[in-house]
């Protein structure tokens, strides 16, 4: 094929003429009109040109034998759905031969040009065919953009579902020790030692659940591929102990022997402790699940150069060699293990891998083969630098002691209102509770609180209106009003500020954070300060400028540095 361009362009006109002289003439005429051309030697070449993405084909009627017509028809049919390939056919005078009529019927977008064709007529016919072709290209581009967007949406949806599935799975983990602790308290109601053990355990587990629910509320982050780590100084041995709090009972229940190997020296590291505990727990749970009763599980942690290694080894059913890498893939379960699986979704190890990688670490699975046990080794970098801030803030927070306040707590969830009131009373405050907005307003008139903690979604008068109406009263003008809510997006916070709230806390409120607010000086003149930051802290941390300067300052470091809980 003699082409004007080195390769076909989308607007190239393919020319198939009876003689090379005719072809050269057509080409000259069109090229003078600024149209790119390619001369084809035969119909086969023309069809190749159509397949390669030319703009228009121009050919003489005499090229259309029954066989070549068939070839051409096939080439046109091979075109993608958006294409209606333009064919210009130069016919003998009369244009009513049987071949021409058949061509018209079966080839779709055909324009007949009767010979002899005058140059302007030929050029204008080719131009309008090219214009039509351009429109087809626009449709093609539009369709491919639509497909791209649809694929992106499906991917986002898939990731959201994946995340939900992971969370649902992981939400169950803390429930077991919570229930155990409650049971222990029920069985030994007067045992102070048991109570303090149970309380410590429940605090840890509640913190873990709060974290997971926070992540659920932050679902929009998933579409941006972000799960945030909350780095803190920690010690690996403490984290191993935390994991054993969760999984120890199930190891014992399954009749396994447990060996824990920890070095005598501390193993300080900076990591997200909840996530590391979660990783170890997942591995331990798997060891329990995939080891027949009476097996032996070894949990060890040690420092190796500048890495920390946690290994969970079992004497269980093992993993075939070809599955060792794949077990970390989403929804992957080793076929022979399915009957041993206890309702797992095949996501635990995916979560382990992602969390470890988020820490800059790696996880590896080892097994000599089926029936010969497995070992999972997590390697975490030390990351000791630049993480002093949370400790400082925590230390400062500890020093804060709140002056006695008159506090009005309003929440239609009676347990929530009553338990918060109990907590505040223990801290020495004078507290009254109301279970809807109207009751809160009535009570405020006589009780004259110095501070009001209002749920937002209350019956009769909602929290926003309660705050607004409180602010209209002589007394309410200068009290501190704090919103308590499950909604923590910036727009929710702004709505609270607009209604007259001083602070917007996301439930469940971190007691130390509340303590800090209670310790703050009485309400200054209302400044209408705006909330800061797109990615402000969650879970009970005020995001607004005033008066939590310190908290806000730390919160602003969150994208790269540690965050404050
Ligand atoms: P789940 O346990 O919920 O199925 P995981 O992602 O935790 O999902 O594990 C994926 C698969 O890897 C399991 O289904 C099991 O086949 C295999 N596996 C995980 N841990 C072990 C282990 N300790 N011993 C043997 N097989 C294991």
Image (cartoon, helix red, strand yellow):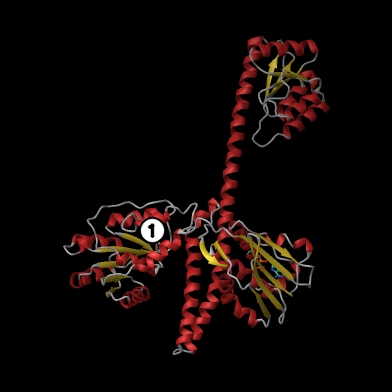
Q: From the viewer's perspective, tell me whether residue 148 is left or right of residue 417.
A: right
Residue tagged 1: 551
Q: Nearer the viewer, residue 297 or 172?
A: 297
Residue 22, located in which quarter of the rendered image?
top right
The residue at 53%/66% (across/down) is 234
Q: Is residue 467 above or below residue 238?
A: above
Residue 361: x %, y % from top left: 63, 58
Element assignment for label 1: helix
Residue 310: x %, y % from top left: 65, 67
The residue at 63%/22% (across/down) is 130
Looking at this view, name the residue that lies furthest to the left: 474
Q: Is residue 178 above or below residue 190?
A: above
Is residue 565 visible in the rendered image? The answer is no
Residue 322, located in which quarter of the rendered image?
bottom right
User: Which quadrant: the N terminus?
Assistant: top right
Q: From the viewer's perspective, tell me whether residue 344 is left or right of residue 553.
A: right
Q: Nearer the viewer, residue 32 or 518?
A: 518
């Amino acid at each position: 094929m003699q082409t004007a361009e080195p390769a076909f362009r989308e607007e190239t006109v393919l020319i198939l003429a009876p003689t090379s002289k005719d072809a050269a003439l057509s080409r000259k005429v069109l090229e003078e009109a600024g149209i790119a051309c390619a001369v084809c030697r035969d119909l086969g070449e023309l069809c190749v040109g159509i397949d390669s993405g030319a703009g228009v084909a121009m050919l003489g009627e005499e090229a259309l034998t029954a066989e070549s017509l068939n070839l051409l028809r096939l080439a046109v049919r091979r075109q993608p759905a958006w294409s209606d390939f333009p064919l210009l056919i130069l016919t003998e005078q009369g244009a009513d031969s049987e071949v021409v009529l058949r061509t018209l019927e079966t080839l779709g977008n055909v324009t007949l040009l009767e010979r002899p064709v005058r140059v302007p007529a030929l050029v204008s016919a080719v131009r309008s065919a090219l214009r039509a072709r351009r429109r087809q290209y626009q449709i093609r581009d539009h369709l491919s953009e639509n497909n791209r967007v649809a694929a992106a949406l499906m991917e986002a949806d898939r990731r959201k579902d994946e995340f939900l599935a992971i969370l649902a799975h992981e939400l169950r983990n803390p429930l077991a020790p919570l229930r155990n602790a409650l049971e222990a308290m029920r069985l030994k109601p007067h045992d102070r030692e048991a109570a303090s053990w149970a309380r410590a355990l429940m605090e840890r587990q509640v913190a873990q659940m709060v974290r997971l629910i926070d992540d659920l509320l932050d679902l929009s982050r998933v579409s941006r591929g972000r799960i945030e780590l909350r780095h803190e100084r920690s010690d690996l041995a403490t984290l191993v102990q935390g994991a054993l709090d969760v999984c120890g009972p199930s190891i014992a229940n399954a009749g396994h022997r447990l060996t824990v190997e920890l070095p005598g020296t501390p193993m300080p590291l900076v990591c997200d402790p909840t996530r590391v505990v979660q990783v170890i727990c997942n591995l331990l749970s798997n060891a329990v699940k995939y080891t027949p009763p009476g097996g032996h599980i070894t949990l060890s942690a040690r420092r190796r150069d500048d890495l920390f290694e946690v290994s969970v080894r079992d004497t269980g059913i093992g993993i075939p060699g070809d599955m060792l890498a794949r077990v970390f893939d989403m929804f992957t379960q080793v076929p022979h293990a399915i009957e041993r699986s206890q309702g797992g979704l095949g996501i635990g190890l995916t979560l382990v891998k992602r969390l470890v990688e988020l820490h800059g670490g790696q996880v590896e699975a080892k097994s000599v083969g089926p029936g010969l046990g497995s070992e999972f080794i997590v390697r975490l970098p030390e990351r000791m630098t630049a993480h002093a801030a949370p400790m400082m803030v925590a230390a400062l927070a500890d020093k804060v002691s709140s002056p006695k306040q008159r506090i009005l707590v309003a929440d239609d969830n009676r347990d929530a209102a009553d338990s918060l009131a109990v907590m505040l009373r223990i801290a020495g405050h004078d507290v009254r509770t109301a279970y809807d907005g109207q009751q809160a307003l009535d009570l405020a008139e006589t009780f004259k609180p110095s501070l009001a903690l209002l749920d937002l979604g209350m019956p009769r008068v909602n929290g926003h209106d309660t705050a607004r109406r409180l602010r209209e009263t002589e007394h309410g003008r200068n009290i501190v009003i704090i919103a308590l809510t499950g909604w923590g997006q910036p727009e929710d916070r702004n709505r609270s500020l607009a209604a007259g709230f001083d602070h917007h806390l996301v439930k469940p409120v971190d007691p130390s954070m509340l303590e800090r607010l209670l310790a703050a000086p009485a309400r200054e003149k209302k400044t209408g300060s705006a909330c800061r930051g797109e990615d402000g802290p969650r879970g009970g941390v005020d995001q607004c400028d005033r008066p939590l300067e310190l908290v806000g300052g730390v919160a602003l470091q969150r994208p790269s540095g540690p965050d404050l809980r």
